[in-house]
Image (cartoon, grey):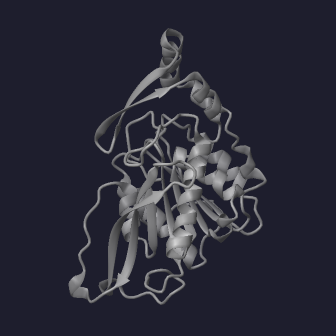
Amino acid sequence: MFATLTTPPVIIPYIWVGSGNVDTRSTGHMHMPALPRRYRIRTSTKLFIPHPTVPGCDIVGILEQLRGVPARNLNQEHRRIALKRLALRLPCDSFRFDFRGNHETPGTWRQGALTDDIDDLNAVVAYLKSRHGYTIDLVVGHSRGSLVAFRWLCTSEEAKHVRGFVNASGRYRMRKILDSAAVKIWRDSFEKQGYHTWSVSVARKLATVKIYPEDLEMFTSWDTSLVWDKFPPAIDVLTLHGLSDQTVPPYDALIYARALSQRDSGTHSLCMMEGADHNFSGRQDDVVDTVLRWWAARQRGEIRTGVWMDDSLRGKL
């Protein structure tokens, strides 16, 4: 679940899952001796995962894998989007994919069909486990992807293996979307024709979807309160949110910080990024660097619950 960044208002998500590999062909994960960077190559493989409950729907995603190779064979391609860059720089295998109805995965996208996204994520995790021997180690979700990830982490048995979660621009107060200018336009369309036609740019291509009143009701009824009591106690969380986010109020990040900072063992780090919008436009490198520094500090056992500010920001104050 790792869809292209778009301009606000953004509902289309992306999720990246980093995996602890038990397949002996992989050399980059911390459970195995890490090779020096000059001896590692990352391969990208497009996967088509048959959906177990939706005939004819293959979930499309990219599997990034590390391999040990002589330095002369190293050939990494450059990517533009923030979490593609992240996937190429983290020292472990990773997988990013599209929910149904998003970009390359077929199906019908619906504003309120968050349960369908959960089913897609479960299908991906089951496939990666059965076909490649992976367990999920780190989950990164943005916007709607964060909503799905939170629910999955709170309810799935497979989530017990997860050690880290990055919540980027995650919404907590679902009904606040009703205050947005976009939804006011949607409601005008509901009254005129029973639905709203929404045109968005996905992977630099124009996509058109229909939003119905019942979709909006389903979306605003999504329960986020389970994070207070059901979120796994040992998972370390980094919440990233732009202070200029006009789609999801930055205050929602503070609510998540409050909910996740009282657990027994897991930590919560809050990073509010000044000048950043919902998609962190123009700040992709800052996002990647922040996640990498947080994850490295976590691996060293150096993170504590509180406000996250790495050394690279101190000189900018």
Taking 200 as reference, is 193 left or right?
Answer: right
Taking 24 as reference, is 167 left or right?
Answer: right
**Residue 208, x across and y down, in percent:** 38, 30
Viewer-proximal residue among 123 and 291: 123
**Residue 72, x across and y down, in percent:** 20, 86
For image coordinates 69% across by 66% down, the residue present is 266
**Residue 182, x across and y down, in percent:** 48, 24
In the depicted structure, whether residue 172 falls above or below residue 187? below
Q: Residue furthest front?
A: 55
For image coordinates 58% across by 38% down, the residue present is 113
Asked if one can make out residue 314 in the rendered structure from this viewpoint, the answer is no
Q: Residue furthest left?
A: 72
Viewer-proximal residue among 293 and 62: 62
Asked if one can make out residue 47 in the rendered structure from this viewpoint, the answer is yes
Quadrant of the image for the C terminus? bottom left
Q: Residue 252, located in which quarter of the rendered image?
A: top right
**Residue 95, x across and y down, in percent:** 45, 64
For image coordinates 26% across by 72% down, the residue present is 76
How many marks can you see? 0
Q: Residue 268, located in which quarter of the rendered image?
A: bottom right
For image coordinates 57% across by 69% down, the residue present is 136
